[in-house]
Image (cartoon, rainbow, N blue to C red):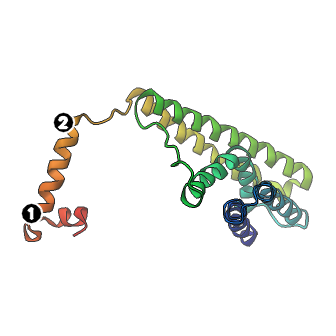
Amino acid sequence: MAAFIIGAEVAFWLFIGLGLAVRYLLKMPRTSVFVLLLVPLIDVVLLVVAVAHMRQGATADLTHALAALYLGFSIVFGHAMIRWADQRVAHRFAGGPPPKKGPKYGMARAKDEWIFAVKTLVAWGLAMGIVYLMVWLVGDAEVTGSLVASVSWAAKIPGICAIIALTYTIWPKTPKTPAQEAEAAEEASGLQRRPKSELSSIERVNSGL
C-alpha cells in the first residue's frame, strides 16, 4: 500500500507539471484544463485501492488512513496548489506577472493565518468523513478498527495552525523601521568586512564562510 501512496504523490505533481507544460509550452489551454482536471482523480483512485485492499482482508494501518487524508486535503487545497504552480510557470515561461505574495505583517497576516487554519480544519473534517465512508464500504470492524484512530491524530494539524494564527493575532508582526533596516545592513556589512580569522566559529557558519 505504501507504494501506491508514493505513486499517487508522484502522479499528482506529474499531472500538474504535464498540464502546465501543455498550457504554456504547447500552447493548448483547453487540453491543459482537461489534464489538470485529472489531478483530483488520482486521490480518488488511491482511495478505491485502499478500500479494495482492506476488503481483501488487509488490516487497516496508517497508509490506508493517508488515502483519506490525501483526498480531504486535495479537495480543500488542490486548487490553490495548482494556482500556485500555474502563477510561477506563467511568470517563468509566458511572461506573466510575478506571483502574488501574501501579507507579511499586521492583522492582514493574522487573517491569512486564520483562513489557512480554518481550511485545514475543513480538510481534516472531510478526511474523517471519508474514513467513516471507508469503514462502511469495508464492513468489517476487525479490519478497520484502527482506521479512525489513525486519522484522528491529524487533528493536531489544524490545532497547530490555530495556535500560529493566534500568536499572529496577539503579537502582530510589524515591519522593520528604516532605522532597524539600516542597523541590520550595517551589521551585515561590518561582518563581511571583518577578516575571516577574526570571526568566531558561529559567525563563520552563519555567514557561510
Percent position of residue 70, x then y:
71, 54
Number of residues whose C-alpha sits closer than 10 Å to that of mark 1, classed few (under 14), some (14–19) or many (20 or more):
few
The residue tagged 1 is 194
Query: Quarter holding the C terminus?
Result: bottom left
Number of residues whose C-alpha sits closer than 10 Å to that of mark 2, classed few (under 14), some (14–19) or many (20 or more):
few
The residue tagged 2 is 179
Percent position of residue 147, x then y:
76, 53
Percent position of residue 157, x then y:
58, 45
Q: Nearer the viewer, residue 159 or 13?
A: 13
Q: Which of 30 and 197 is in front in this view?
A: 30
Q: Please count the marks in the image.
A: 2
Name which residue type carries label 2: Ala
Query: Quarter holding the N terminus?
Result: bottom right
Q: Which residue is drawn at 80% across and 59% down?
A: 31
- 135 vs 178, left or right, is right
Q: Residue at x 54, y 48 (%)?
A: 97
Q: Nearer the viewer, residue 149 or 27?
A: 27
Compute the Cα span from label 2 to label 1: 23 Å
Q: Nearer the viewer, residue 5 or 134?
A: 5
Q: Label 1 near label 2: C-beta < 8 Å? A: no
Name which residue type carries label 1: Arg
Residue 197 visible in the picture:
yes
- 54 vs 154, left or right, is right
Q: Which residue is drawn at 71% across and 57% down?
A: 66
Q: Quadrant of residue 62?
A: bottom right
Percent position of residue 40, x then y:
78, 54
- 197 vs 55, left or right, is left
Instruction: Kindly identify which numbered label has been placed on residue 135.
Output: none
